[in-house]
Image (spheres, rainbow, N blue to C red):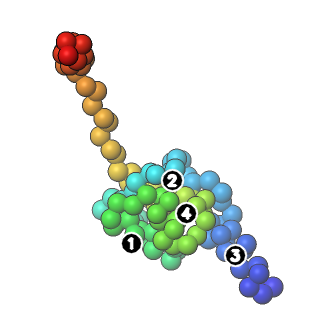
Amino acid sequence: MGKEAGPLVRPYAVTRGRTQPRGVRLDLVTILVVSGRGAAENVRLSSEHRRLLELCRRPSTTADLASEVELPLRVVQVLLGDLYHYGLIEEVRQPAPQRPDAHLLMRVLDELRHL
């Protein structure tokens, strides 16, 4: 088993055989950032976990993180799911876009009709 087996075995080993993140849905554009909380005493982070945690010091998307660590997206989603489960990272919530005022839109429409 030379180098050929490395890429096939490594992702499986990195996630300990898991293929789904724990209890959180992380798509390509989910923005994550460190939470500022420390890891519990019983939490053991792999080098890949620590690398992702370091990269999350600045808000980053799941896709950007996968590209940065050069691991398959699914593997990164599983590892990020672990960090999220441990409370070490959190999702950056974007404010909901505000709907324009209906009264204002009607006035604009009326003015456009007068032109």
Residue assigned mark 2? 28
Residue 10 lies left or right of residue 51; in this view the side is right
- Tell me which label, 2 or 4, sits earlier in the chain: 2
The amino acid marked with disc number 3 is Pro
Q: Measure the C-alpha gap from mark 3 to mark 2.
A: 22 Å
- Tell me which label, 1 or 3, sits earlier in the chain: 3
> Residue visible at 40% across and 54% down?
31
Residue assigned mark 1? 54
Label 2 crowd (10 A; few <14 / some 14-19 / many >=20): few
Q: Report helix, strand or loop for mark 3.
A: helix
Q: Report helix, strand or loop for mark 1.
A: helix
Q: Where is residue 44 in the image (x, y as percent from the top left)?
A: 50, 71
Residue assigned mark 3? 7
Q: Measure the C-alpha gap from mark 4 to mark 3.
A: 14 Å
Q: Identify which residue, 45 or 105, lies in the foreground.
A: 105
Label 1 crowd (10 A; few <14 / some 14-19 / many >=20): few
Look at the numbered discs 1 and 2 and tell me whether their residues touch, using CB distance below 8 Å.
no
> Residue visible at 33% across and 65% down?
58
Look at the numbered discs 1 and 3 and tell me whether their residues touch, using CB distance below 8 Å.
no
Label 4 crowd (10 A; few <14 / some 14-19 / many >=20): many
Q: Report helix, strand or loop for mark 4.
A: helix
The amino acid marked with disc number 2 is Leu
- Tell me which label, 3 or 2, sits earlier in the chain: 3
Do we see residue 5 in this rendering?
yes
Label 3 crowd (10 A; few <14 / some 14-19 / many >=20): few
Residue assigned mark 4? 76
